[in-house]
Image (cartoon, rainbow, N blue to C red):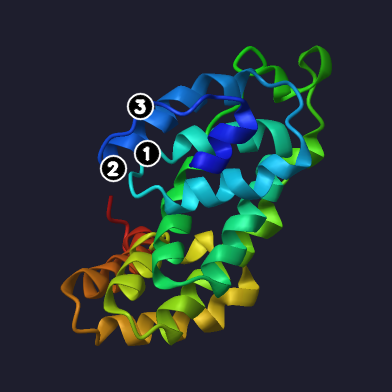
Amino acid sequence: MTEVARLAGVGDVAPEPDDRHARRLAHAVRKPLLERASPPEEWFAPLMAAAVYDPDPSFCRWFVEPAVYAFGRRRVMAALVDYLRTGTDTERAGAMRAWYCAHVPLHADRSPAYGPGGVRDPALDETQDIRAVWLETSLRVFAESTDPQTCHRALLGLPASRSAYPPSLRGLLESTLASARAHSDPYIRRWATAADREEALPERGRSSRRRGLP
């Protein structure tokens, strides 16, 4: 947080207990971050670190949003995938919170970093393949992590619909569902039940139509 404030040219605020001091710094840098048309490259890593280490899922947006405007949604999401893949449990939790914020809608009048003359290069925000990597990494984190909270967060942050996963992940998804059905965490078991229920609905619909039922 202090590094982001330094880069943004924001003077340090009056010292307070750690949590309030960090929050006051976050308030102080929010506006300058969005007002910068072309943040330098050195801003990217501190912005992502601040987003991942902020424990509040609402406030971490203050760092994710300007990063998305300035560096592109694709690059931000790729950085969060890296945190999820190789980070500590704390960093993985932060990456999951920041991932939600990385879907923030973009508007030309929100930040001058949107693009020259209000025109943005669509390649900056092309993320279909990155989203697939996030799904795969989350499934693997669930399978491999020994931390119960990390497993819980990794799985429950994923869609419970098979149609949301590319064909290349169907095998991994089915093995995940098998583990989730027998898991000790009731919320994880409910996630598996929701996926199974969603899968059964189309077949029930086809059966009903064959029987002439509404």
Which residue is the site of mark 2?
19
Residue type at the position of mark 2: Asp
Dot 1 or dot 3, earlier in sequence: 3
Above or below — where is 91 with respect to 6? below
Residue 99 can be seen, yes or no:
no
Question: Residue at horizontal 77%, vertical 41%?
Answer: 41
Direction from residue 168 to residue 90 in the image, left or right: left
Q: Kindly indicate the quadrant of the structure image that contains residue 14.
A: top left
Residue type at the position of mark 1: Ala
Above or below — where is 19 with respect to 32? below
Direction from residue 101 to residue 46 in the image, left or right: right
In terms of secondary structure, where does tag 1 sit? helix
| Foreground of the two, 200 or 44 | 44
Dot 3 or dot 2, earlier in sequence: 3
Which residue is the site of mark 1?
22
Direction from residue 167 to residue 188 in the image, left or right: left
- Marks 1 and 3 sit apart, C-alpha to C-alpha, by 11 Å
- Marks 3 and 2 sit apart, C-alpha to C-alpha, by 13 Å
Coordinates of residue 48 in the picture (x, y in percent): 57, 48
* For discs 1 and 3, the disc positioned in front in the rendered view: 3
Question: Residue at horizontal 28%, vertical 50%?
Answer: 214
Question: Residue at horizontal 52%, vertical 82%?
Answer: 172
Q: Residues within 10 Å of mark 3 (few under 14, many from 20)?
A: few
Evaluate if marks 1 and 2 touch, with contact meaning CB atoms under 8 Å apart: yes
